[in-house]
Image (cartoon, rainbow, N blue to C red):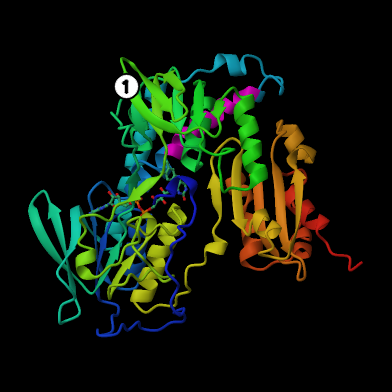
Amino acid sequence: MTSADEHQPAGDRPEPPAPAEGRRTQETAGSSPVRAGSRVVIIGGGPGGYEAALVAAQLGARVSVVERQGMGGAAVLTDVVPSKTLIATAEWMTATDQSAELGIRGGAEGASVDMAAVNRRVLTLAARQSQDIRARLEREGVRVVDGVGRLVGDLRADGTRIVRARTEDGEEDLVAEIVLVATGAHPRVLPDALPDGERILTWAQMYNLTELPEHLVVVGSGVTGAEFAGAYNGLGVPVTLVSSRDRVLPGEDEDAAELIETVFRRRGMNVLSRSRAAAVRRVGDGVEVELTDGRVIAASHCLLAVGGVPNTEGLGLEDVGVALTEQGHVRVDRVSRTTAVRVYAAGDCTGVLPLASVAAMQGRIAMWHALGDAVAPLDLDAVTANIFTAPEIATIGVTERDVQEGKVDAVVTQLPLARNPRAKMLGIREGFVKVMADRHSGAVIGGVVVAPRASELIFPLAIAVTQRITVDQLANVFTIYPSLTGSIAEAARTLHQTGN
Ligand SMILES: Cc1cc2nc3c(=O)[nH]c(=O)nc-3n(C[C@H](O)[C@H](O)[C@H](O)COP(=O)(O)OP(=O)(O)OC[C@H]3O[C@@H](n4cnc5c(N)ncnc54)[C@H](O)[C@@H]3O)c2cc1C
């Protein structure tokens, strides 16, 4: 997951094999067919692992999940759930910015943040979510093994493999017809910026803070960096964002990224573009962040958000014939097969697209395929993604850059939310809806929404893209008046082709 921070697909994905579609029992060369009743062992209990476990149990397999940290994995314990819970508090604080305009006295000035209470809530919520997932799995008959798993030995004559789990009670060998590796990734650190867990922090360590930082430097302006920088800025913390690129959120829709950078700067964030951190040092009760051009920024805390490293070491993968990429990701095809018979892999350890939703889908696909259910190969064009800044950025399908580079023949329209009546009532001035449609058929093939709760508003566009709905069909759907979704229908209407 070297590119986790950018939420970008890894460029070195192996070519997909012939799609395996339709309901059938999967047979792999040199082994007997696998069916319901098979033993499935999953290493890693994040979204890739636990969603696969649910599917496998539903299909009648006997399923064990070996997890070392807690069910839900990094997604629930350190990444998605904690960060979005923190952002929920920041959103409330950001909303008070507009309270005066809406006629409320004392809003922005009256509110302050109790960081210890915020992080207590974050960690409690994450722990509960983890327990809920475990309880759900156990209700479905899945065995959860608290321990560290690894593959040992090769495929045995009877077509099974061994996953050895190291638990508090010692070692246990789990026999499996099917193995799924869903071990995720961990934060990357820089050699001259080693986290101390107090002042120099990875995102996983941010929830130990009991007081607001006096000045937070965020190194890395990909999705994780931008989300944390925006959140802490929203909580009232002075933030410096060190971005190695021309603008924040490289690789995202350019209009959206530009808008977010403008919002960041307007809210007082110090965005240092084309700047790279060379070293981060602990100095007394603070930190010094040294940039490659020699500048030094003094601050109270530094967050390193420079991507992730796949958890693929020490799993015995190469020993059993699982090929890794140069970055250490497991090579998989579009039905999650690795290069070893009956060993599948899903999620961030594959580097395909570091999103919880993609990990979950890869895990489900693996089980549908392995257990002979109907399965369609992973389709990355249909992935909706969201960046939880304020406003949020949600995307689906082709990008405007794809259109500009001639990869698709499409028409593009963009409507500012400032013209939307509901947005005016809500005091929303920033944000837009962008729709991309196939020039010939009029089918909606891509969209961007930049708005508060864009993560919810993108759904009509996601349905349109995945169901090949045309702009005319979309425009003819009744929307609520007044509503932000009215802008989506309006954008679709502007793309109506008159045939002139
Ligand atoms: C700060 C942050 C915010 C994010 N926000 C979002 C978001 O809003 N939406 C979104 O879709 N994605 C988000 N992501 C990405 C998302 O967290 C990952 O894509 C997702 O966690 C991948 O799921 P996974 O199952 O592959 O791995 P993980 O969730 O990392 O789970 C893997 C589990 O396997 C365990 N494990 C590893 N090795 C072993 C072993 N040998 N034995 C036993 N257990 C093992 C690990 O400890 C871990 O618990 C975010 C990422 C970050 C860093």
User: Would residue 13 appear left or right of 309 to someone viewing this image?
Assistant: right
Nearest the camera: 473 or 135?
473
Q: Is residue 199 visible?
A: no
User: Would residue 477 appear left or right of 460 to someone viewing this image?
Assistant: right
Above or below 133: residue 60:
below
Q: Is 452 one of the magenta-colored residues?
A: no
Counting labels gives 1
Q: Is 88 one of the magenta-colored residues?
A: yes
**Quadrant of the rendered image containing residue 435:** bottom right
Quadrant of the rendering where the C terminus is positioned? bottom right
Could you tell me residue 397's position as x and y percent? 61, 59
User: Would residue 248 appear left or right of 43 to someone viewing this image?
Assistant: right
Q: Residue at x 30, y 67 (%)?
A: 323
Nearest the camera: 105 or 366?
366
Q: What's drawn in magenta, residue-wise?
A: 83-97
Badge 1 density bin: few <14, some 14–19, many ≥20, Cα 10 Å = many
Q: Is residue 497 visible?
A: yes
Q: Secondary structure at mark 1?
A: strand
Q: Residue at x 29, y 65 (%)?
A: 180
Nearest the camera: 418 or 141?
418
Could you tell me residue 56's position as x and y percent? 33, 69
**Main SS class of the magenta portion in the image:** helix
Above or below 56: residue 218:
above
Above or below 496: residue 215:
above
Q: Residue at x 19, y 57 (%)?
A: 149
Could you tell me residue 312's position as x and y percent? 28, 56
Query: Which kind of residue does numbered mark 1 sit on?
Result: Arg
- From the image, tell me which residue sits under label 1: 282
**Quadrant of the rendered image containing residue 390:** top right
Q: Residue at x 55, y 47 (%)?
A: 386
Above or below 317: residue 101:
above
